[in-house]
Amino acid sequence: MAGAEVRGADGAREGTDGRPPRGVRIRDMTETDVDGVSAVRVRGWQAAYRGLMPQAYLDALSVAEDARKRRERFARRRPEAWQLVAERGGEVVGWLAAGPARDADLAPDGGLPAEAPPAAELMALYVAPALIGRGVGRALLSAGTARAGARGFGTLSLWMVRGNDRARRLYERAGFAPDGAEEAYDVGGWRVPELRYRRPLP
């Protein structure tokens, strides 16, 4: 979805069972986590999208500004959406945001049969760059997917920047596959293409 959080900055050598690595706890995000989440998100963008977005744009990203906006969004968060953090030693080292799918074609009246279970969307997944490949992203994704299934959603979708191969490997190992939807949005004068991936939920 153009202009929304760009998804997926984690990846390649993570564990396979979806459990958090030793010393890492997955829990619901609280307001006190906002600064930590913003730091993970901004550093995640700067690491994951180097070469995929304008470097000047990435360099100009501000943790403080992101935190200001995120605090406002958190206060207005929707009860049907959920945000999880990975915490290690009292520090936020990962963040996931998900909720009902925003794409019109995934709504029952926009493409899915009326009797189909509702569709969920993974809107953001970021891990502190120093911990990429340690299992944090897989644990967050596993917990977020389980939450979607427990809430009665039938599918989980996400949008991923084309060329983010580390994220692609993570998602494909977790059962996601491209569904053919593509779009692009503008970042600092650069057209950034995204692909939509989906997976069924048990």
Image (tube, rainbow, N blue to C red):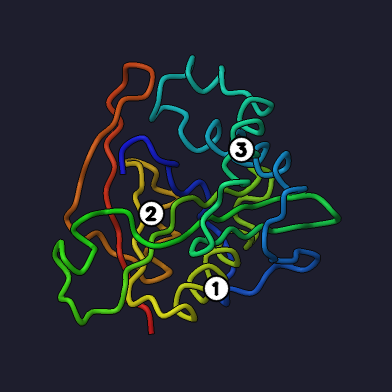
What's the distance in space between the residues labelled 3 and 1, CA to CA?
A: 36 Å
Q: At 41% from the left edge and 27% from the top edge, which residue is drawn?
A: 51
First reached walking from the N terminus: tag 1 or tag 2:
1
Q: Which residue is mark 1?
A: 16
Residue 113, placed above or below residue 131: below
Q: Is residue 133 left or right of residue 11?
A: right
- The residues tagged by marks 1 and 2 sit, at their Cα atoms, a distance apart of 15 Å
- CB-based contact (under 8 Å), mark 3 and mark 1: no
**Mark 1 is on which residue type?**
Thr
* Residue marked by disc 3: 72
Q: Residues within 10 Å of mark 3 (few under 14, many from 20)?
A: few
Residue in the picture at 63% in, 25% down: 65
The image shows residue 90 at horizontal and vertical percentages of 85, 54
| Residue type of the residue flagged with mark 2 | Arg
Kindly report the distance in space between the C-alpha atoms of the residues bearing marks 3 and 2: 31 Å
Q: Residues within 10 Å of mark 1 (few under 14, many from 20)?
A: few
Q: Which mark is residue 100?
A: none
**Image quadrant occupied by the C terminus:** bottom left
Quadrant hosting residue 179? bottom left
Question: How many numbered badges does the structure rendering display?
Answer: 3
Foreground disc of the pair 3, 2: 3
Which quarter of the image is occupied by the N terminus? top left
